Amino acid sequence: MRAIVAGLVLLVAFLPSSASAQKKGKECDPVPEEFQTGGDATYAECAVDKKARVSRHPRINYSAVPVTGATCLKAVIDLVVDIDGKVVPGSARLVSTNSQVYANELMVVIGQTLFSPAKKGDSLVKQLFRYEGEMQVRVSSSAMPGGARRPPPC
């Protein structure tokens, strides 16, 4: 009985390190061909050692976005970040949105976004990046029936 218990303890102690080893060796899905630009490979987020990070968000023309029934406007855009931390021109693709007007405005200015570029080993590399933009709409209390109400957070 002690041998079985000792064997189970050894097995349980081994599982977490085995699972993390499998996670590190996990294969990423290939980056779609439409995001492979300029001859250099574009890597998925899971294939780089240091992920690209936003260092400056784009400045959207908020006055162009009409207030609708939604209080939190969202848009998800896939794009390629180059080794200089800039959006590769023409690489932005809209994935989803709950406001086409907001998404259109964001697509116009997405090229202004700056990033710290991705790294694989000691080399800077291009990375497929998923940008998730959101804008909370605040309606003045005079426009809302029943007095002041705060919209839910995004």
Image (cartoon, helix red, strand yellow):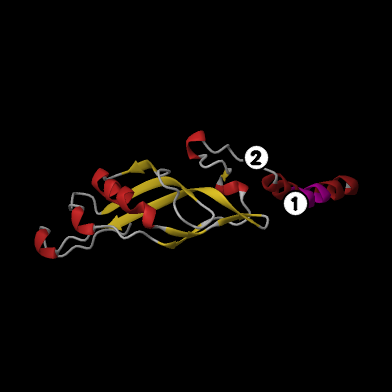
Horizontal and vertical percent position of residue 42? 56, 44
The span picked out in magenta is 9-17
Q: Closer to the camera: disc 1 or disc 2?
A: 2
Within the image, what quadrant is residue 90 found in? top left
Horizontal and vertical percent position of residue 129? 48, 49
Label 1 vs 2, first from the N-terminus: 1
Q: Amino acid at mark 2?
A: Glu
Q: Is residue 83 left or right of residue 122?
A: left
Q: Is residue 118 left or right of residue 101?
A: right
For mark 2, give the secondary structure.
loop
User: Which quadrant, please, contains the C terminus?
Assistant: bottom left
Classified by dominant secondary structure, the portion drawn in magenta counts as helix
- Circle 1 residue: 17
The residue depicted at 19 percent of the width and 58 percent of the height is: 63
Q: Which mark is residue 27?
A: 2
- In depth, the one of 65 and 84 nearer the eye is 84
User: Which quadrant, please, contains the N terminus?
Assistant: top right
Q: Is residue 65 left or right of residue 25?
A: left
Horizontal and vertical percent position of residue 91? 43, 43
- In depth, the one of 142 and 127 nearer the eye is 127
Q: Is residue 12 magenta?
A: yes
Q: Amino acid at mark 1?
A: Ser
Tag count: 2
The residue depicted at 30 percent of the width and 47 percent of the height is: 103
Within the image, what quadrant is residue 93 found in? top left
Q: Is residue 80 magenta?
A: no
The residue depicted at 86 percent of the width and 50 percent of the height is: 6
Does residue 96 lie above or below 113 as drawn? above
